[in-house]
Amino acid sequence: MWQPSIFIFLILLIVSINHLPLAPARGQWCVVSPSATDAQMQANIDWLCGHGHVDCIPIKPGGPCFQPDNLRSHVSFVMNQYYQYNGKTEKACYFSNTGIFVFKDPSYGHCEYDY
């Protein structure tokens, strides 16, 4: 039969494992919502790039985030840049209710999303 000290050790071990904190997510990113319209996405790009709020060179031809050459990909990249460099707040990802948070890194190829 088991000694009482081993039994107590096993109970404490089980209890402590159940109370360990989960590892924090590696990052949080702001991307465009799947429900955003082309007009909304274009308005976001116009505001972010047209007013110098973010560096839009990566989404221009020849930039690391130009491909795939589509509005959704481009706007997600610049929305995330704005979010990351403006306090990482909910407000910095609002974009007239077109921004959403993701917890899986959206980076691909040479296109690196900041976090």
Image (cartoon, grey):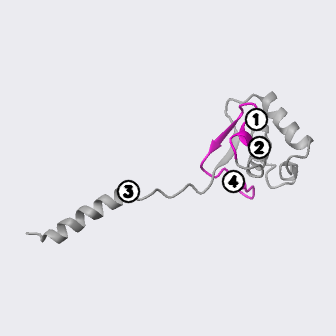
Q: Nearer the viewer, residue 6 or 62?
A: 6
Give the CA separation, mark 2 to mark 3.
36 Å
Query: Secondary structure under badge 2?
Result: helix
User: At which x and y percent is residue 33?
Assistant: 68, 35
Amino acid identity at mark 3: His
Which one is in front in this view, the residue at disc 2 or the one at disc 3? 3
Residue 83 is inside the magenta segment: no
**Which is more N-terminal, label 4 or label 3?**
3
Compute the Cα span from label 1 to label 3.
38 Å
Q: Earlier in the sequence, mark 1 or mark 4?
A: 1
Based on the picture, tell me whether residue 112 belongs to the magenta stretch.
Answer: yes
Q: What residue sits 68% from the left and 29% below the top?
A: 35
The answer to whether the residues at label 2 and label 3 have Cβ atoms under 8 Å apart is no
Crowd class of label 2 (few under 14; some 14 to 19; many from 20; radius 10 Å): many
C-alpha distance separating marks 3 and 4: 33 Å
Residue 107 marker: 4
Depth check, mark 4 against mark 2: the one in front is 2
Q: Could you give the CA–CA distance between mark 1 and mark 2, rounded to whole angstroms?
A: 8 Å
Q: Which residue is identified by label 1?
A: 95
Name the kind of residue labelled 2 in the image. Answer: Met
Task: Look at the numbered disc 1 and give the secondary structure of its residue.
Answer: loop
Residue at position x 69%, y 53% in the image: 107
Q: Are marks 4 and 2 in contact (CB under 8 Å)?
A: no
Q: Which residue is found at the position 18% from the left and 71% from the top?
A: 5
Q: How packed is label 4: few (under 14 Cα within 10 Å), some, or many (20 or more)?
A: few
Give the magenta part as a residue range: 89-115
Examine the image and state in which quarter residue 49 appears: top right
- Which numbered disc covers residue 79? 2
Cα separation between marks 1 and 4: 21 Å
- The answer to whether the residues at label 1 and label 2 have Cβ atoms under 8 Å apart is yes
